[in-house]
Amino acid sequence: MFSDVVATYVKYFRFLKGNQTMYFIKFALCEVLNLLAVVINFAITNCFLSGKFSSYGSDVLNYMGMNYSERTSVVNPMCNAFPTKVSCEFKKFGAGSGQEVILISITIDPYTNP
């Protein structure tokens, strides 16, 4: 009885063997495209953050490994890489009964300026 079940599964496996080649090719292509998307996102983020993103992890680990006296003489990479901004909204009224909204962004962290 057990040998009949095993023989049935072996027969089914041999029937399916080699029939999934197209599925594997599509799967591998999707994985390559996912990897490409990750690389492109990394490059865009690094460009947006003025090249500070690629070494961010190692910079933070080096900074956290320093003692307090060494940290005071070095800029914190967690404050240096990501910009800190605030925005203010001013409402301006003109002669024509309309309201104009002006949005002004100001950088408040001096270390984020390139």
Image (cartoon, grey):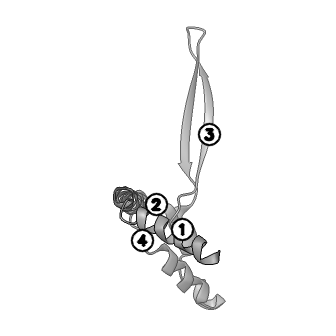
> Is residue 86 placed above or below 8 in the rendered structure?
above
> Is residue 114 placed above or below 78 in the rendered structure?
above
Amino acid type, residue under disc 3 in the picture: Cys
Q: Residue 113: which disc?
A: 2
The residues tagged by marks 2 and 4 sit, at their Cα atoms, a distance apart of 18 Å
- One can see residue 73 in this view: no
Question: For the view shown, which residue lies furthest in the top direction?
Answer: 96
The residues tagged by marks 3 and 4 sit, at their Cα atoms, a distance apart of 31 Å
The tag earlier along the polypeptide, 1 or 3, is 1
Quarter of the figure with residue 103 = top right
Circles 4 and 1, Cβ within 8 Å, touching? The answer is: no
> Is residue 112 placed above or below 3 in the rendered structure?
above
Q: Secondary structure at mark 3?
A: strand
Which quadrant is home to the C terminus?
bottom left
Q: Which residue is mark 1?
A: 8
Q: Nearer the viewer, residue 87 or 13?
A: 13
| Residue at the (57%, 74%) spot, across then down | 6
Q: Residue 54: which disc?
A: 4
Q: Nearer the viewer, mark 2 or mark 4?
A: 4
Quarter of the figure with residue 21 = bottom left
- Residue 67: image x %, image y %? 63, 91
Q: Which residue is mark 3?
A: 88
Q: Residues within 10 Å of mark 3 (few under 14, many from 20)?
A: few
- Residue 27: image x %, image y %? 40, 59
Q: Nearer the viewer, mark 4 or mark 1?
A: 1
